[in-house]
Amino acid sequence: MRSQWLNALAVLASVLAGTLIVVANAERPAAHYLFNVSYDPTRELYRDLNRLFEGKYEGEHGSGVAIRQSHGGSSLQARRVASGEDSPDVVTLGLPSDVMAIQNRGLIAENWRDRLPNHSRPYYSTIVFVVRKGNPHRVRDWPDLVKGEISVIVPDPKSSGNGKLAALAAWGAAVLRGASESEAREFLRAFYAHAPFLLPAARAAADAFSLEKQGDVHVAWENEALREVDASRGALEIVYPPVSILAEPSVAWVDANVDKHHSEPLARAYLEFLFSEEAQEVMARNGYRPVDEAVARRHAKRLPPIELFSIERIAQDWPDAQRKFFGESGIIDAVYTLKPRAE
């Protein structure tokens, strides 16, 4: 009963957190409004960035702007935008392939990657491990996740960017060390066999691990891992595996929507702001790896060097990875069975 109550409370807290972000910003009176659909763990990041941009814009233009936010699993968010269920001015999603899914529906221009610096990637990230104090299971590397009775908390790769990247990182860690494709498939199958359930997004997985104390290791975005460890007051530790994937969250304005909303200049200014030094500082403080080299050097202790492999090491590109791993009858379908959380 207590477990059921904790599960319900965690879900309710996640729902309310997302609702409050949207409502609080929506109620702020302003001359201009912008709607940003983002992925799950960026709540705190865009809370800080939006406040900074809103103040900067009002100081420069003499009129106010309010930014509404939506957060959820990156792939689920992309599907909502592509289907017209949400109508954002901008998207700030966890994977280039999620932006491409919206582009493929004709809502974003084909040249979106070339409209902003660094191919429209304002920061980068990776996937790491969070363990309990003292690392009792001695988790150091990807093969450690499939040993013994270890329990792995990881989001669903069907809905979550974190979930997709965890699968790609695990696969790459195997094949780049000489595993055959069949051996890599068996490793992924074992990886999911050690997951007691799969939650739809990164924050729900983090809450299950850190608040409800379920599982032995959480496979997480680096920024989410840093937030969890900071909030745990010494109860959790972060482990950097020897190798992980280069995650490339990407941003774009949604052409079809900014045309309807007459908001393209504001949307462009907002996304260009993400590449400014002050915004890059905010990203680094929130655990995201900035593309500004000077800012990155200032935060090198918090964001230490780690060997990252690009998507091109395991697929032709992000669209090919989407098809190969997550498409119908792809690799994930062959090794993964949906594991809803027991009530």
Image (cartoon, helix red, strand yellow):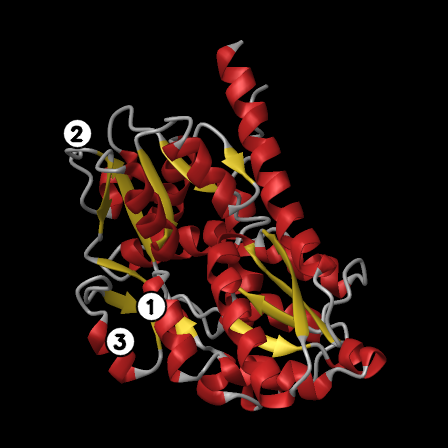
Q: Position of residue 282 (x, y in %)?
A: 39, 69
Q: Residues within 10 Å of mark 1 (few under 14, many from 20)?
A: many
* Residue furthest top in the image: 1
Identified by mark 1, the residue type is Ala
**Residue pictured at 39% horizontal, 51% vertical:** 224
- For residue 284, the mark is 1
Q: Position of residue 167 (x, y in %)?
A: 42, 51
Q: Where, by quadrant of the figure, is residue 140 drawn?
A: top left
- CA distance separating discs 3 and 2: 32 Å
Q: Where, by quadrant of the figure, is residue 191 drawn?
A: top left
- Whether residue 29 is visible here, answered yes or no, is yes
Do the numbered discs 1 and 3 sit on residues whose CB atoms are within 8 Å?
yes
**Residue pictured at 29% horizontal, 35% vertical:** 146
Identified by mark 3, the residue type is Ala
Q: Where, by quadrant of the figure, is residue 151 drawn?
A: top left
List the residue tagged with mark 2. 136
Q: Position of residue 89 (x, y in %)?
A: 71, 73
List the residue tagged with mark 3. 296
Please state, as top left, top right, bottom left or bottom right, where the N terminus lies in the image: top right
Q: Secondary structure at mark 1?
A: helix
- CA distance separating discs 1 and 3: 7 Å
Does label 1 or label 3 sit earlier along the sequence? 1
* Residue furthest right in the image: 260
- Badge nearest the viewer, 1 or 2: 1
Q: Residues within 10 Å of mark 2 (few under 14, many from 20)?
A: few
Q: Secondary structure at mark 3?
A: helix
